[in-house]
C-alpha cells in the first residue's frame, strides 16, 4: 500500500504533540529538581486524610496548583508504569519481596512452615500411627491450610494419595464429595472395585459413599476438606460427620482431614458424639514470638532487605501471633522501603506500610474500620481495648469472664472492677462481634490486629507516637494475655 503524503494541518498536529510531550517532560524534571522529589515519590491518593502527613498534600504557592498537579500527575503515572513493569518482571526486588512475604497463598514449602512443626507432628501421629481422622481448627490466618497442604505433600512423597478440595458455602453433601470421587477415579484407571464409585448416582448418602470407598482396594488415601466452616447446608455437615464415623467403623483405607475455624469441633461432635474415639482435633493457635521473628528473618533473606530491630519488634507485636498479619505488614513495609530506594525497613517505611495495609483492609471492612477509627480518636485509656484485641488475636473466641481475668492479670484494673470494665469493652465493640452461648469473636477474624493499628495511626496523627514505647507497652500486655491462659 502506498504511503499517503500528510497535509500541512496533520504535520502541525504532530509537531504540537511532540512539543507538548517535550514541555511536559521538562516541567516534570524541573519539579523534581525544585522540590527534590526524585527520591521521595508522592503517595498515591487514598481518598482520605493521610495519617502520617497530618493533612492533605497541597501545592506550594510559588509554582501554581494547576502546574504542580500536572507535574505530579505525570510523575505518579510514571511511578505506576514502573510498578506495573517491575511487578511483571520476575527478576525485580519488588517481586522477590512479594514472593517472600506473600500472605494471600498458603505456604507451599514445608521449610517455610514457621513455628508449626509441633502441630504437624501431632497431625502425622494421629493420622499415620493411630489411623484417626483429624480436624485442623483455629482463627483465620494462622496457617491451617498451610499445615494441611504440607501434610498432603508428605503423603504424596511417601507414595500414597492425598486429595485436596475446598468447600463452598451452599454446597450439599454430593457437591462436597463428588470432586474426591472424580479425582480418585482419574488417578487410578485400574483401581480395584472402581465400579462401586462409578455406580454412585446424582444423589447419595454418607453410607453409600463409605460403602463405595471401602470397596476400592487397600491403597491408603487421604481426603483433605478445607473451608469446612463455610458450609451452611445442615445435611452436608451431618452427612460429613456420618462419613467419618462410617469410614472408621468399616476400617476403610480412607481417612479425612477437615479444616475449619474453631467452632467446627463442637458442630461435628454434636452430630456424632461417638466420633471422639476416631477424631483428633489439632488446634492451630498463634505462633510464638521467636517463630514470628524467624518468619520475618527468612522473608527478609529471600526478599533481599533487612529490618531494623525496633521495626521487627513492632511487626511481631502488631501481628499478635498471626503469620498472615506478620507477612501482610512486612510485605507492605518492605515495598515502602524499596519505593524509597532503601534496603533497610526503618520506622518511616513501617508506618507507610501499615497505612497501606490499613487502607486495603478498611476497603473490605469499611464499617469495622470506621468504628475502630472513632474509638481510637475518642478513647484516652486504651489499655483495656488493647488487651481485648490481643486476647481475640490469641484465642479467637473469649467470654466476659476470660476478658475480666486477663484485665486483672495485665493490671489494667483491679479484680473488683475488671468484670464491669470487661462488659463495657464488649459493649463498645458489640456491633462487630459474633456472640454465641456467651462466647464472643470478631465477625471479621482479621480485625483484632487492625484495632491496634487504629491507635497507632491515631498516635502518629496526634504526634504522640514513639515506636519503642508503644512496642514495649504492647509486649507487656501480650505477655500478660499469654500468662493468664
Image (cartoon, grey):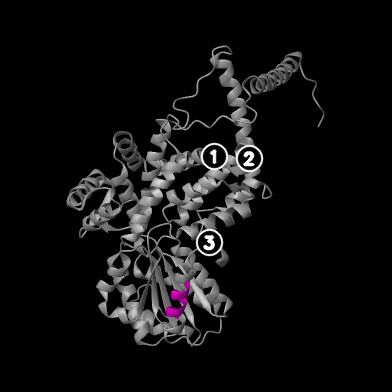
Q: Is residue 170 visible?
A: no
The tag earlier along the polypeptide, 1 or 2, is: 2
Q: Where is residue 74 in the image (x, y as percent from the top left)?
A: 62, 26
Give the residue at the far right of this rendering: 2
Q: Residue 349 carries which label?
A: 1
Q: Nearer the viewer, residue 117 or 212?
A: 117
With respect to residue 213, does 144 lie above or below?
Answer: above
Where's the N terminus, which quadrant? top right
- Whether residue 150 appears in magenta in the rendering, the answer is no
The tag earlier along the polypeptide, 3 or 2, is: 3
- Residue at image position (53%, 57%) is 295
Mark 2 = which residue? 342
Q: Point out the stretch of residues depicted in magenta.
A: 120-127
Q: How far is mark 3 from mark 2, CA to CA?
A: 27 Å
With respect to residue 446, does 285 lie above or below?
Answer: below
Q: Position of residue 115 (x, y in %)?
A: 49, 64
- Residue at image position (48%, 52%) is 326
Q: Nearer the viewer, mark 3 or mark 2?
A: 2
Amino acid at each position: 500500500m502506498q504511503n499517503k503524503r500528510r497535509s500541512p494541518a496533520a504535520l502541525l498536529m504532530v509537531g504540537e504533540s511532540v512539543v507538548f510531550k517535550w514541555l511536559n517532560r521538562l516541567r516534570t524534571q524541573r519539579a523534581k529538581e525544585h522540590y527534590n522529589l526524585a527520591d521521595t515519590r508522592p503517595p498515591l491518593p487514598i481518598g482520605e486524610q493521610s495519617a502520617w502527613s497530618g493533612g492533605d498534600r497541597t501545592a506550594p504557592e510559588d509554582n501554581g496548583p494547576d502546574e504542580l498537579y500536572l507535574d505530579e500527575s505525570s510523575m505518579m503515572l510514571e511511578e505506576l508504569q514502573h510498578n506495573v513493569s517491575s511487578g511483571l518482571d520476575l527478576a525485580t526486588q519488588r517481586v522477590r519481596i512479594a514472593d517472600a512475604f506473600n500472605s494471600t497463598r498458603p505456604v507451599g514449602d514445608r521449610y517455610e512452615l514457621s513455628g508449626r512443626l509441633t502441630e504437624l507432628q501431632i497431625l502425622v501421629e494421629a493420622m499415620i500411627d493411630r489411623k484417626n481422622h483429624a480436624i485442623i481448627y483455629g482463627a483465620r490466618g494462622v496457617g491451617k491450610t498451610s499445615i494441611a497442604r504440607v501434610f498432603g505433600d508428605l503423603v504424596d512423597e511417601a507414595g500414597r494419595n492425598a486429595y485436596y478440595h475446598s468447600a463452598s458455602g451452599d454446597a450439599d453433601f454430593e457437591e462436597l464429595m463428588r470432586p474426591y470421587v472424580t479425582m480418585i477415579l482419574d488417578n487410578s484407571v485400574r483401581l480395584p472395585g472402581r465400579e462401586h464409585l462409578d455406580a454412585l448416582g446424582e444423589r447419595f448418602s454418607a453410607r453409600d459413599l463409605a460403602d463405595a470407598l471401602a470397596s476400592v482396594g487397600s491403597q491408603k488415601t487421604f481426603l483433605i476438606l478445607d473451608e469446612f466452616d463455610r458450609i451452611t447446608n445442615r445435611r452436608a455437615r451431618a452427612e460429613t460427620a456420618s462419613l467419618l464415623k462410617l469410614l472408621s467403623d468399616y476400617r476403610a483405607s480412607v481417612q479425612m482431614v477437615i479444616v475449619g475455624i474453631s467452632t467446627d469441633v463442637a458442630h461435628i461432635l454434636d452430630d456424632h458424639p461417638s466420633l471422639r474415639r476416631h477424631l483428633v482435633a489439632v488446634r492451630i493457635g498463634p505462633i510464638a514470638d521467636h517463630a514470628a521473628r524467624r518468619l520475618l528473618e527468612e522473608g527478609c533473606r529471600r526478599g533481599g532487605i533487612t529490618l531494623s530491630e525496633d521495626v521487627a519488634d513492632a511487626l511481631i507485636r502488631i501481628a499478635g501471633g498471626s503469620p498472615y498479619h506478620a507477612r501482610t505488614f512486612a510485605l507492605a513495609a518492605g515495598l515502602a522501603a524499596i519505593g524509597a530506594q532503601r534496603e533497610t525497613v526503618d520506622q518511616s517505611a513501617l508506618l507507610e506500610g501499615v497505612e497501606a495495609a490499613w487502607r486495603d483492609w478498611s476497603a473490605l471492612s469499611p464499617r469495622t474500620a470506621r468504628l475502630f477509627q472513632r474509638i481510637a480518636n475518642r478513647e484516652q485509656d486504651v489499655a483495656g481495648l488493647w488487651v481485648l484485641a490481643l486476647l481475640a488475636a490469641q484465642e479467637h473466641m473469649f467470654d466476659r469472664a476470660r476478658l475480666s481475668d486477663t484485665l486483672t492479670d495485665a493490671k489494667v484494673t483491679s479484680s473488683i472492677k475488671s468484670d464491669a470494665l470487661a462488659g463495657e469493652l464488649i459493649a463498645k465493640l458489640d456491633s462487630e462481634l459474633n456472640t454465641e452461648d456467651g462466647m464472643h469473636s470478631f465477625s471479621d477474624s482479621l480485625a483484632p490486629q487492625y484495632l491496634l493499628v487504629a491507635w497507632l495511626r491515631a498516635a502518629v496523627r496526634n504526634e504522640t507516637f514513639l515506636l519503642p514505647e508503644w512496642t514495649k507497652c504492647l509486649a507487656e500486655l501480650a505477655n500478660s494475655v499469654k500468662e493468664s491462659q
